[in-house]
Image (cartoon, coloured by chain):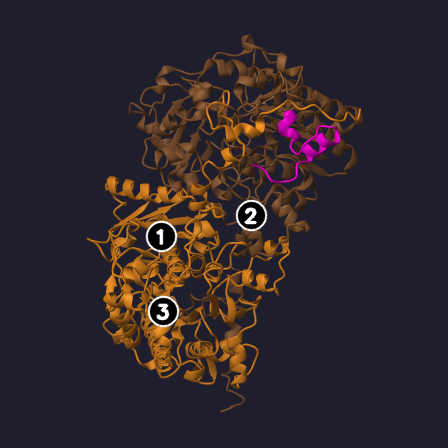
Chain colours: A orange, B brown
Amino acid sequence: MNILFVMYDQLRFDYLSCAGHPHLETPNFDRLAARGVRFTNAYVQSPICGASRMSFYTGRYVSSHGASYNNYPLRVGEMTMGDHLRAAGMDCWLIGKTHMAADAEGMARLGLAPDSVIGARQAECGFDVWARDDGLWAYGPDGYYDERRSPYNEYLNSKGYDGENPWADYATAGTDGDEIASGWMFANADRPANIREEDSETPWLTSEAIAFIDQVKGPWCAHLSYIKPHWPYIVPAPYHAIFGPTDVLPVVRDPRERENPHPVYAAYMEGAVAKAFQREEVRQKVIPAYMGLVKQCDDQLGRLLDHLEATGAAATTMIVLTSDHGDYLGDHWLGEKDLFHDPSVKVPMFVVDPRPEADATRGTTCPALVEAIDLVPSFVEAAGGTIAEHILEGRSLMPWLRGETPVWRECAISEFDYAATSAGQSLGLAPRDCRLFMAFDGRYKLVHAEGGFRPMLFDLDRDPREFEDLAKAGGHDAVIDRLYDRLNAWARRQSQRVTVSDAQIQGNRGASTRRGILPFLVDGSEVPNELTQRYRGKVRQRHVDPD
Amino acid sequence: MNILFVMYDQLRFDYLSCAGHPHLETPNFDRLAARGVRFTNAYVQSPICGASRMSFYTGRYVSSHGASYNNYPLRVGEMTMGDHLRAAGMDCWLIGKTHMAADAEGMARLGLAPDSVIGARQAECGFDVWARDDGLWAYGPDGYYDERRSPYNEYLNSKGYDGENPWADYATAGTDGDEIASGWMFANADRPANIREEDSETPWLTSEAIAFIDQVKGPWCAHLSYIKPHWPYIVPAPYHAIFGPTDVLPVVRDPRERENPHPVYAAYMEGAVAKAFQREEVRQKVIPAYMGLVKQCDDQLGRLLDHLEATGAAATTMIVLTSDHGDYLGDHWLGEKDLFHDPSVKVPMFVVDPRPEADATRGTTCPALVEAIDLVPSFVEAAGGTIAEHILEGRSLMPWLRGETPVWRECAISEFDYAATSAGQSLGLAPRDCRLFMAFDGRYKLVHAEGGFRPMLFDLDRDPREFEDLAKAGGHDAVIDRLYDRLNAWARRQSQRVTVSDAQIQGNRGASTRRGILPFLVDGSEVPNELTQRYRGKVRQRHVDPD
């Protein structure tokens, strides 16, 4: 079996028709959901690209792998999906985005050459690279945001789009008469991108995936990792015009949220992104473009599924589909992601296993508290490997697919390190105190902020839109204490004993005794003679005295 | 300046005359204490050799480096004292014991050859090896405990002590007529070891240190790491006969400790080592031998200090002296170490800085809550380097030496992973639940045990001998809550963001904006033109249309 691990970037859990969006028909997402299990409570380990992805790719919490923000390098030697899958006999390939930053210092310290097989995998988060494209070929007065080679820009050049950065000049540019109307500016989000639709990012990457599937022999896991519907919010025709202001859902926000808000939330509400999305005209421009990008993703997913079916590959390919985080789109007075309201931290998660043992659950939903880190163990199980439970902190989802009800976590955890952000700066905190934690037990969501702040608390049963921070007024101490107990038990977890498995520990009990370590004997009569016989016998005399 | 980092193994903090032992004169330890600062509240990060040492050598808590028990490999790439000091221009050498287990799997995964310079340092915990000897050349029916080459056994062979394991046949063997009376058996502890005193372990290693000092040019940090007074409890003449039963201090234990004890403590009190040390005749045999071993250490320390003074090296050598943990010796109904009573978790810690700026504090004691992890940052500061605060979790002790009163920790933390032990087995716990944590604020000592147990609490002001577990009877909730708050804040610490420093984070703020990432613009008027000019200009048209 092969595994096609599809990730979208910044795709909200609820912008799919199968998840209830009333104006955005996504028949191909729905078609996939109908074939497998859709997990309706899937949470990412951090609502930010880089940190979230490093958790997806390592199967470990953010504070375990340490790459807690975009472009913080993943420490050399940290085990990845690729390491685990190759140990199980499955290759692991990348087609698209990872947001991986190589630990160049660590690699140099260990003498790992970036152009060796081992070095390249270390630098690429354990993947073998079919195509790596992180999708942000931004450039400004200080140079490029992403200085790597861009296969997408090379593709565009090959198609006649000229210049050093056709991503910026075509793919994310609209037009305003003779002038570029950049997709960076929300006011331009209703313009069509200056590119033929088939050359835009999502079709290009889909074509790469189809080429990969046709050319590469398995067993493989292929991470098809789309850049969209992440900003810049601009989409080529005809998708720019499919949706309009009447398709925009009412903003989900409430005046109560602005009354005595938690200081970290307050700082976020004052940020430039939030301020922009607090303007209704921004939502009216951006959200139809975002929906158009999702619609294009849906069409390309259909193209991919059609190809898998036409070639027969669907029967031997497990398909997993998710996103690295959501997008506030103005909800809760915010834009982008970073905090822990559901539009930001909850993601779509579909798992389709073509094997007969998963037949009973096709088309069902599962409300278990799923975390991003559950995918690596799921993949290892699907690949027939042994899950390294002393390293992987997630749990295989495969029992749910088989209709079982495994013992499961009672609390989902997510983290956010905002030391690099303007909110961290405006709050004047030391980097180490710029940290947020979410503990969600399926009903109550606690947000803990380091730095001496009070927590936030939401009751999603009574307040599913998360308007009322119950911790503001005091009270609810029992609930808060219970969630803190869960958070702190999690914080005390053993995450770094990665070189010894439980089975090894249990198997080694008594081994040192049998290798002569006996610091408990009074006279030796306490143990069988074989354990002490090498410490008995005739007294030895030195044979030679060199002095 | 050079640094001589002297460690003893299993040396109790209070078995030195400068620390108040009434019958054990240690003039050379005292002489060293008179030259520098003696820290009277120094705690190890785990009261077990391997885990404690990995914290000493990495400057990180046990749950940060993950090598939580003896022979659990330190994960490849984890930075060590050697990495930090070499970055500061100082070599880092080993003379003696580390208890390091190489992460052979991790090294193989990264293609690191054990015989390369980088690979050898990875395998040897960052040290360059002058002599590595872990001191436990035990052997039993299943082979050797330590399968490495033993330079000490080679030395003994060269001195005419024959056989494959003269450590066992001579150095740790006594005599009973014609028969070996092994030092493994406490009943033999009053016999002299079957070896000339000058060939026993402590003099041998001291000679190696003297040879090193005479031959190796600095700047170096040399870790002179003695195996003694660790068991086997047997010492050559004349040290075997210096102390006798009348020198044995009364056992420090109380019947209250056996009333409704904490289940983990109860399991330890039922262990074979504890049972042996609960017998007074065992203490009467073992403790005089232990004192003899300490006395020999003291004499050899004098020999070393004399050499440093005679050669003038003392003036340019910072000397740091400590132990990896203590020894219950029957106190609290226990033997060995593992738990968090002071005889186990508290260690001697002397720092002698020969430079004039430390003159004001010579011969003083300092009661600050010091941890083992403070040594690496102290050494980096002494070496003139920059302390990597995003990696090193301790704090430099150097300000105390200069008579300053730095802002300091309010709580010392220690951890113990007993999954591999018989206590873990007898309690029937999953390996992950076999974990203990100590939080000590200078007065109250909280011990938390995973697995659903109640905590333990001691008030060392009112009960310095730690007889009364205040958590047994209930009450003291405010103190317990306060210590849990400290423990949990510590547990939530950011320990793995080791690839990015605070300074880098702060320096990079705003960098992505200047590299063209602008996901907050409505129309571009919000920012200076230079930030958006590359996204403006004439609309581009594809120059070539290959289709």
Q: Is residue B82 left or right of residue A205?
A: right
The residues tagged by marks 2 and 3 sit, at their Cα atoms, a distance apart of 34 Å
Tell me the SS state at disc 2. Answer: loop
Instruction: Determine the residue positioned at 42% across, 48% down.
Output: A435
Asked if disc 1 and disc 3 are in contact, CB closer than 8 Å, the reply is no
Identify the magenta region. Answer: B144-171
Determine whether B441 is above or below A313 in the image.
Answer: above
The residue tagged 3 is A318
Of residues A45 and B184, the one nearer the viewer is B184
Q: Is residue A227 above or below residue B304?
A: below
Amino acid type assigned to the residue bearing label 1 in the image:
Ala
Q: Are marks 1 and 3 on the same chain?
A: yes
Residue B109, image quadrant: bottom right
Q: Nearer the viewer, residue A161 or A262?
A: A161
Locate residue A471 relative to residue A266 in the image: left or right: left
Residue hosting label 1? A266
Q: Label 3 amino acid?
A: Met
Whether callout 2 and callout 3 share a subunit is answered no
Number of dots carrying numbers: 3
Q: Can residue B539 be seen here?
A: yes
Asked if residue B535 lies in the magenta stretch, the reply is no
Pointer 2 residue: B103
Q: Which of B384 and B513 lies nearest the eye of the viewer?
A: B384
